[in-house]
Image (cartoon, helix red, strand yellow):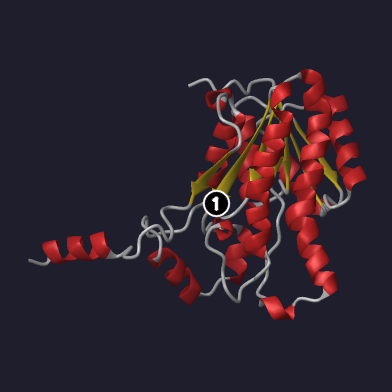
Amino acid sequence: MDLGLTGKTVVVTGGSKGIGYAAAEAFLKEGASVAICSRHEEELKKAAETLSQYGPVYYEAYDVVDAESNYRFAEHVNQKFGSLDVWVNNVGVSGPKKGDEYDDEEIDFMTGVCFKSVVYGCQAAFRYMKKQHSGAIVNVSSLAARCPSAGRSTLYGPLKSAINNLTNTFAGEYCPYNVRVTCIMPGFTLTPAVKQTISPEELSMNTQATLLRRAAMPEEIARPIVFLASSAASYMTATTIEVSGGRSMTLNPSFAYDRLAAAENR
């Protein structure tokens, strides 16, 4: 299937690793030019060097929580590639904190990275998509928007839930300009950050509650992102797609596995 991404310009925030890197690679393989950003220049440079084997890559280090920096990045991308067709808001941050442990500085930081960066990314993208009368914005939320974790980064779930709502709101505002806004809600994914911090016990708990009995790999989240941005999803907007392997969708996720094991042991 031709996804209609050849020659398109795609921005992926947080594109130096994890889901963002996998998405950047997937877009490049579909024939798009890709611009990635994060706060860490050395990581970006290394990622861009590797990604460039698949197609044209531009990178820029800046703080996505700053509105003007997002606007400048969008301008630079448009100048380099001549258009701005897709913007993926992928940046986020989590951490093991309970709700009563956050102070003002931490609340502002979490809100900035998880929510304000998405608002500013949408605004920056729309400046150019409005002129083109076309474009697709994909926001990366989290399963935590539906199933928040008590005692582990308490603010993360509510802020991701706000992204789901923001997606529909911007979709309603941008639709006259043929700009679609969609959202993807990944489940438990083995990104480099997760691999470094998760314990074997927590990994087991997460996979046992998932119908597919495993965590996602970043590329399994990247592919639905590419789909939402593509012409294959041209009639989709104000939509959030969950890609969680069936996490917490049944009260008895072990039922079918136990039944199969019992049948095999007869």
Can residue 35 be seen by looking at this rendering? yes
Q: Residue furthest bottom?
A: 101
Residue 52 position in % (x across, y down): 71, 35
- The quadrant holding residue 96 is bottom right
Residue 198 position in % (x across, y down): 56, 71
Q: Which residue is mark 1?
A: 186
- Element at label 1: strand
Residue at 74% from the left image edge and 41% from the top image edge: 49
Question: Which one is in front, 224 or 105?
Answer: 105
Question: Which one is in front, 2 or 169?
Answer: 169
Residue 156 position in % (x across, y down): 66, 63
Looking at the rendered structure, the kind of residue marked 1 is Pro
Residue at 55% from the left image edge and 32% from the top image edge: 227
Residue 120 to residue 80: above or below: below
Residue 20 to residue 262: above or below: above
Residue at 38% from the left image edge and 67% from the top image edge: 208
Can residue 10 be seen by looking at this rendering? no
Left or right: 110, with 184 as reference point: right
- The quadrant holding residue 60 is top right
Left or right: 85, with 183 as reference point: right
Residue at 61% from the left image edge and 73% from the top image edge: 152
